[in-house]
Image: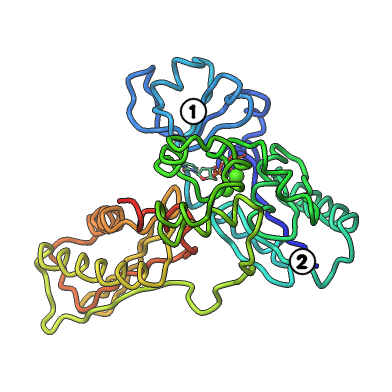
Amino acid sequence: MRIIFLVDMDYFFAACEEVRRPEIRGKPVAVGADPKAGKGRGVVMTCNYEARKYGIKSGMPVSKAYFLCKDCIFIEPDFDYYERTSGKVMDILRGYADKFEQVSIDEAYLDASNRLGSYEEAETYAKRIKDRIMEELGLPCSIGISYNKLLAKMACQEAKPNGIKIVREGEGKKFLENMDIGELYGVGKKIREKLEKEGIKTIGQLAKSNVIELVEKFGKYGIELYNYSNGIDESEVVENYEVKSIGREYTFEKDEADLKNITSKYLELCDEAIKELKSKGFEFKTVTIKVRYYDFEEHIKSTSMASPSDSEEAARKCISSLVNGIEKGKKVRKIGVRFGGLVKALGQKKLSLYFS
Ligand code: DCP
Ligand code: CA
Ligand code: CA
């Protein structure tokens, strides 16, 4: 019997802020750009559950969030801090797993089948994990437990906030049955619209549909959708030991002082590295550039993304802004670009291969 946990931190960025600013606890808090009394641009990255009561959510323009709740406390994101905190969370979680797989900044799968004999034991184990993270880091999380990754992930969604939800063997189909089709892992907006056109509104309806017709409509992905809707997912929890970061370096033949030439070389390296990253199915969270001057002085600068990405455009933007900090006119010998915090692209991404 497999026992798999999906641990996902609650309102992560905002929870991190509550830890270092206890005075904001219990009040509505959103992390995102400054709303400038409703005139600000940019979006809410996340908000705590007090703010959610007002209808504020991730991805919403901050101007709209401001009008929904004028008393909401808006905090500009501090990615380095969230990354560091995430690292501490992951270090704790790793200790509870036979097999461990981080899937995003605030979430990871743990396979603990070898350590546990029953779901009762699993529940106690999950409580221990939650207590430990709360005691050491002051952060709440939710945990889904099941016999596969798909159901663990969906159980976690039900467990939120600050809870534990178990889906036992034999309960998978029933657990999913009445949920809206959009709730199914792997179903994005486009697929949902297509399915709804066919009259498929619940996961249960999808589970009963004709798999051959699904393949006709969605290609190979139709089989995956069919399996998911039936609560079937054989994929293993796997840590990517091999690749932690992907990068490129370049040494100029002659020391280069022209920032335009230097920048275009950085972007070339960026494109090459992104190509490799995509071909391996990764998304990056951090971008680092390195510069070594003619006198061997070396500098490293990095920045973090709000959420993992494999976008060439986003990568180029980060790099251009980092390059801005390079000393002008000083001769450069060697440069490097590196993408770190790699995670496997999620199911949603795979869909874009079928529907672009
Ligand atoms: N995030 C972001 N932009 C988004 C969604 C999320 O920058 N559109 C960031 C902020 C979140 C973090 O990623 O804190 C984790 O995202 P989750 O989807 O897990 O959401 P939260 O942890 O914020 O809330 P929940 O309690 O619902 O998990
Ligand atoms: Ca979360
Ligand atoms: Ca998450």
In the image, what residue occupies the spot 74% across and 60% down? 147
Can you identify the residue that label 1 sits on?
74
Looking at this view, is 18 or 117 the one in front?
A: 117
Q: Is residue 142 left or right of residue 249?
A: right
User: What is the three-letter code of the residue carrying label 1?
Assistant: Phe
Q: Is residue 136 left or right of residue 202?
A: right
In the image, what residue occupies the spot 52% across and 55% down? 211
- At which x and y percent is residue 53? 61, 21
Mark 1 residue element: strand
Mark 2 residue element: loop
How many angstroms separate mark 2 from mark 1 (CA)? 42 Å
In the image, what residue occupies the spot 68% across and 52% down? 151
Q: From what the image shows, is residue 58 above or below residue 223?
A: above
- At which x and y percent is residue 34? 40, 28
Q: Are marks 2 and 1 in contact (CB under 8 Å)?
A: no
Can you identify the residue that label 2 sits on?
2
Looking at this view, is 245 or 186 the one in front?
A: 186
Looking at this view, is 319 or 111 the one in front?
A: 111
Colour basis: rainbow
- At which x and y percent is residue 213? 46, 52
The CB of the residue at mark 1 lies under 8 Å from ligand 1: no
Q: Residues within 10 Å of mark 2 (few under 14, many from 20)?
A: some
Looking at this view, is 96 or 27 the one in front?
A: 96
Mark 2 or mark 1: name the one nearer the start of the chain.
Answer: 2
In the image, what residue occupies the spot 53% across and 51% down? 210
- At which x and y percent is residue 46? 52, 36
User: What is the three-letter code of the residue carrying label 2?
Assistant: Arg
Q: From what the image shows, is residue 178 above or below residue 306?
A: above
Q: Residues within 10 Å of mark 1 (few under 14, many from 20)?
A: many
Q: Which mark is residue 83?
A: none
Q: From what the image shows, is residue 197 above or below residue 286?
A: above
Task: Tell me how many marks there are.
Answer: 2
